Amino acid sequence: MNIAIIGAGISGCSCAHQLTQAGHQVTVVEKGRGVGGRMATRRMDGARIDHGAQFYTARDIRLQVLNKQWCKEKRAIEWYDQVPGRTDIPTDMRYRGKTGMTGPAKSLTQRSKLALNFFVEKIERTKGWKILEREGEGRVLEADHLVITMPSQQMLELFDRSRVKLGAESMGRLEAIRHTRCLAILGILDRPSRLIYPGAVTHPAKNIDWLSDNQVKGISQKPAITLHTSADLSQINWDVPAAEWAPELLASVEDQLGARVLSWVPHRWGFAKPLVTFGASHLHLPELGLTLAGDGFGGERVERASISGLEAAEAILGTIF
């Protein structure tokens, strides 16, 4: 079967892996330049910076199987299981990409075709599905079955452009999904920071949820920070120029870092953490040849988003045979 997956976050990549393992032809369609979604790693002034998801857990046996392969391929390694001085934080092992968080996603899509820099203008239901690109190369893809793992708001916008309607209950549950926003700062330091291994602290200052040094983390040759702001501050300042809110936050952590931020850039995550989910790990509509998944279905954390993709693939495979 020829299957197309729109969205190359960890959910879409996990779904692709499961389907290609079963022998199906899979094309992963992604509007960005690479796979991974919020499992994102960026090069900046000679540094490597994880600026989205910072780690993942592998509590579920299915994730343990995948993680074993990622570690074998040297795409992932153990990071930490306990934060010094924070007995309130669970001690599950956190894993990270060995050279960045994109590593596991790249592993999952090794057997898939990739259609990158492909913004989907609309989808058309014929005998199967047609996926039409907005501008660009004007590409048109065809598939027997379509999987969509982009954020729910983007799904709804795509359905509206395509005049695709699902049942009232399904549409209502999709419309109810809500995510937080997150404003991030990626910064280059003038010297190694004072952060001790694992190089990350939660809530180090007011309005900051996460601060890490990617050099101490082990992925960057140069000291470079990732700073995630709180959901409240992100919401308030979403449309405000970064120059108006970022300098105060950076100043509030420089003493803790023991270093000065030489240069920085902002990044906006419009769908950071799901607050309200669909209520099931996926939606499978075999009569339409359509399946929906993602963290808006599976829930917060990389692991749950991955399971959403895996269970979506299992549903597809269950209706083929």
Image: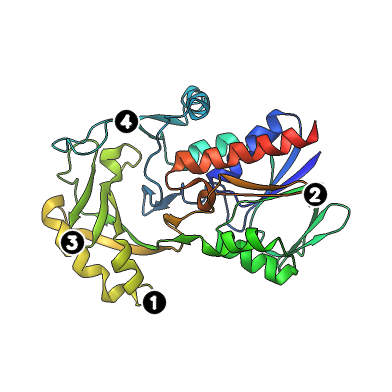
Q: Which label's residue is closer to the chain start, 4 or 1?
A: 4
Q: What residue sits 77% from the left and 36% below the top? A: 319
Location of mark 3 (residue): 206
Give the image location of residue 228, x and y in percent. 31, 57
Q: Which label's residue is closer to the chain start, 4 or 3?
A: 4
Q: What amino acid is labelled 3 in the image?
A: Lys
Give the image location of residue 297, x and y in percent. 54, 49
Position of 11 with respect to 27 (left or right) is: left
Dot 3 falls on a residue whose secondary structure is: loop
- Which quarter of the image is occupied by the C terminus? top right
- Coloring applied to the structure: rainbow
Q: Which of labels 1 and 2 is toward the front?
A: 2
Location of mark 2 (residue): 287
Q: Compared with residue 17, is residue 224 higher up or lower down, i.e. above or below? A: below
- Which quarter of the image is occupied by the N terminus? top right
Q: Which mark is residue 239?
A: 1
* Residue 258 seen anywhere in this rendered image of the structure: no
Q: What amino acid is labelled 1 in the image?
A: Asp
Q: Which label's residue is closer to the chain start, 1 or 3?
A: 3
Residue nearest the observer in this picture, 216 or 162: 162
Q: What residue sits 33% from the left and 67% below the top? A: 234
Position of 275 with respect to 85 (left or right) is: right
Q: What residue sits 21% from the left and 36% below the top? A: 83
